[in-house]
Amino acid sequence: MSITKQRLLCGVIPVLLLILAVSPVCYAEGEVNAMPHLRLGAGARSIGLGGAYTAIAEDATATVWNPAGLGSAADLSLNFSTQRLSLDRTHNFIAITKMLGSYGSIGLAATNFGVSDYNLYDAKGEYGGKADYSSNAYSLSYGIAVGNFNLGLTGRMLADNFGVDSVENQSGFGGVDIGLMGHALHIDANEEQVPTFHYGVVAKYLGASLGEAGTVPMVVDVGVAYDLYMGNVVTFSADIEQEFVNLEESAFSMRGGVEYTIVTNKSTEFAIRAGVRASRDVQNLFGGLGINIAGLQLDYAIQDGMASEINGVGSTHYVSVSYEF
């Protein structure tokens, strides 16, 4: 057996073991998802790929998608993303990661979902005024590379506040994410050996709960990606996701994306992206583009106007700025 095949086999085995370890859990019953917006993701690049990012998240957004990606992140990585869901709903993300030399990398991230001037009605349907709703998640992540494999861990705290005249606060544990990522099939490119095949698996929100507001169901994502080098680079990625909750809506979904990166010189890149996300109940299309100049990257993504639980009806726009060095 060749060395490449041995490396690939050694990577697939731990992935399968992790899936088997986290799969036999009890499904959460009923409408228990206290913070469904956590699954919106982060970063316009990943959104432009339809969210098929589990195997290639190697920037600050890895704190959301797969903490194992921090093991391959740059020495310092910053990301700020904003998403306008509707006239009164916003979703913002900010993160910073730092390499600790041979000891891996750490990441700090904060996610905010807010609704302004929310109409209130009592049990009789009578209007009770307006309120603001804000939901926040704060996380600490760690990732390390061991050969061609990365391991990662995220711990998360949740804070929820809602009220009319006085704000009602509620906090809870946002669970633990455990991730693995692997790289294989190396080739010579740009005067160095680079992997072309990537795979990842992550179990998210293990043990998460927000008190009386409910729990956050566990989610398992499995993804693969392939980089095709032909002067420029074409990246193909695909994910499958299973949410462990008993609801009438489908808890299983698939995501796929493609990115064409044009390398104009050693310090400038331009990328165009397309993606799709589909379940039994909902299908969404995505598109996007990005430009990277000497580590400073600006990305834009758009989601089609299909209805969803979070953003209602209408196209959704994403913008993110990141910096790596």
Image: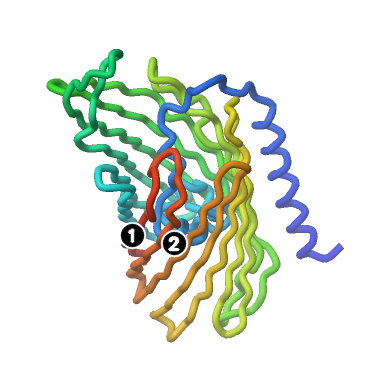
Within 10 Å of the Cα at label 1, are there few (<14), some (14-19), or many (20+) other Cα atoms? Answer: many
Q: Quadrant of residue 197?
A: bottom right
Q: Where does label 1 land, which residue?
A: 320
| 296 vs 207: above or below | below
Q: Quadrant of the C terminus?
A: bottom left
Q: Quadrant of residue 212?
A: top left
* 231 on left or right of 85: right
Q: Quadrant of the N terminus?
A: bottom right
As measured in the structure, the alpha-carbon distance from the residue carrying label 2 to the one carrying label 1 is 8 Å
The amino acid pointed to by label 1 is Ser
Residue situated furthest left in the rendering: 165
Q: Residue at x 58, y 69 (%)?
A: 235
Residue situated furthest front in the rendering: 125
Q: Quadrant of residue 193?
A: bottom right
Q: Residue at x 25, y 31 (%)?
A: 133
Label 2 sits on a secondary structure element that is helix
| 119 vs 198: above or below | above
The amino acid pointed to by label 2 is Arg
Q: Where does label 2 land, which residue?
A: 45
Q: Position of residue 241 (x, y in %)?
A: 60, 43
Q: Residue at x 64, y 79 (%)?
A: 188
165 or 111: nearer the eye? 165
Badges 2 and 1: C-beta atoms under 8 Å apart? yes
Mark seen at residue 277? none
Residue situated furthest right in the rendering: 1
42 or 288: nearer the eye? 288
* 212 on left or right of 218: left
Q: Position of residue 144 (x, y in %)?
A: 52, 49
